[in-house]
Structures are given as structure tokens and as C-alpha cells.
Image: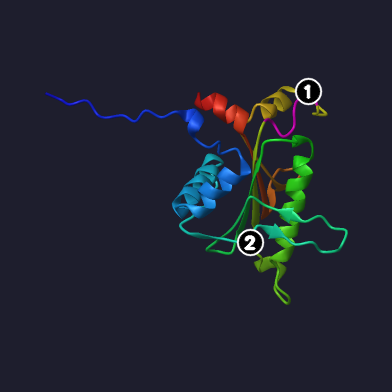
Amino acid sequence: MCKEAETLKIDYLQLMDLRIDYAFKILFTKGDPRLLISLLNAIFANKKINRVIKSLSIKNPYLDKESGDDKLSILDIRAELEDGTTILIEMHMYALGELKAKTIRSWARAFGEDLEVGGSYAEQPPTIAIAFTNGAVESLENSKTKTTEAKANANKIHRLCMIMDCEDFTVFTDAMELHYIDMKLFAKAVN
């Protein structure tokens, strides 16, 4: 006689919402590092990026002010891979309007910080920014073109943006990757 497996009764309302910055940071920086490694590997695999992370270290999440008038930026997670690549991770559940500019600014500041005095620009490892969002980064209403392609982009769960040649669409440099993951579409797809 086969005994039925025991299942846990979980009240999901009692669990912490991982879309909240604090919960997200605690789970992925204070817990088992394999959680963050698995998350990042899944993100890269989704876009068929040939990068497999085996280890990483969590770094100071502050992007220091460069002048008295500059804004202090505090990331949710800042990690460094074994090859020196910097990963910036943000959970953004509100204010999508300025998210693209904020992500690019954080990327640029982190990329600029990583260059050592006397170092070669060509040897500088990439900086990758990942933003989890509460909706599409650019809605169809804000799009300059309302083409079928624009509609498809508005319904993407995971957008990868890089610096490319506008004529032949070849990647100009791998120094920048911006990943935007729409958590609303992701939740809808999972459910």
C-alpha cells in the first residue's frame, strides 16, 4: 500500500513579498549565495547569453556621490563575479517613468568606478544592470511607434538592451547589458 506524501499547508499571505526591497535584499544577500547565482544564471539563460556564474561576492550597494550636488544611489544588490564583472540588481515596484534613465545612470556610475588609475579601458570588465519592474518599462502609449513590433515589445517579460550598431544590429560592446524583467507579465505567465 502506497502512503500519500505529506504536503505542507502554507498560508501565502503570511510569507514576505519578495517584491519589497528589504525582503528581496535579505533573501538574495543574506541567505544561501546559490539563490542569487541561480537567479542570475536563469536570467542570462533566458536570453541565451553564454555566461554561467559559479561564484560571486556581494559588494557595497552604495554608488558614492561625486560632488555635493550629486544624488546618492543605493542599489538593492551589487555583486561582483569571479571575472570582475559587476552586477547591479534593483527591485522597482513603483515609479517606472524614470526607470530607464535611473538604470543607465547607475550603470554608468558603477562602470566608471571600476576603472583603476592607469588601467586599460579595453580590459575593463562589463557592468550589467538588472531591474525587476512592476509593469512594462515603456508602455505602448509612450512608444513613438505603434507598430506590431512595438506591441510585441510592450508584452515582453524580459527585455535585454545593449549598445548596438543601428544599421546592422551587431553588438558594439559587451560592456553594457540592461535587463528589464516585467514582474506583472511574469506573474501572469506563471499563473
Residue 138, how many percent across, how many down? 74, 32
**Residue at 55 percent of width and 64 percent of height:** 83
**Residue at 55 percent of width and 47 percent of height:** 49
Sequence-wise, which precedes: disc 1 or disc 2? Answer: 2
Name the side, left or right, on which 52 lies relative to 102.
left
Residue 7, how many percent across, how many down? 31, 29
Q: Residue 3 occupies which quadrant of the picture? A: top left
What amino acid type is highlighted by mark number 2?
Answer: Asn
Residue 135, how many percent across, how many down? 67, 30
What is the magenta segment's predominant secondary structure? loop
| Within-10-Å neighbours for mark 1: few <14, some 14–19, many 20+ | few
Return the residue at label 1: 146
Above or below residue 37? Residue 161 is above
What amino acid type is highlighted by mark number 1?
Answer: Lys
Q: Nearer the viewer, residue 71 or 50?
A: 71
Reply yes or no: does residue 27 show up in magenta.
no
Number of disc labels: 2
Query: Outermost residue, bottom direction?
Result: 118
The answer to the question of whether label 1 and label 2 lie on touching residues, with beta carbons closer than 8 A, is no
Return the residue at label 2: 60
Q: Is residue 38 visible?
A: yes
Q: Which residues are magenta?
A: 135-141
- Measured in 3D between alpha carbons, the distance from the residue under mark 1 to the one under mark 2, in whole angstroms, is 41 Å
Above or below residue 181? Residue 120 is below
Question: Helix, strand or loop at disc 2?
Answer: loop
Q: Residue 152 occupies which quadrant of the picture? A: top right
Q: Nearer the viewer, residue 50 or 96?
A: 96
Reply yes or no: does residue 139 show up in magenta.
yes
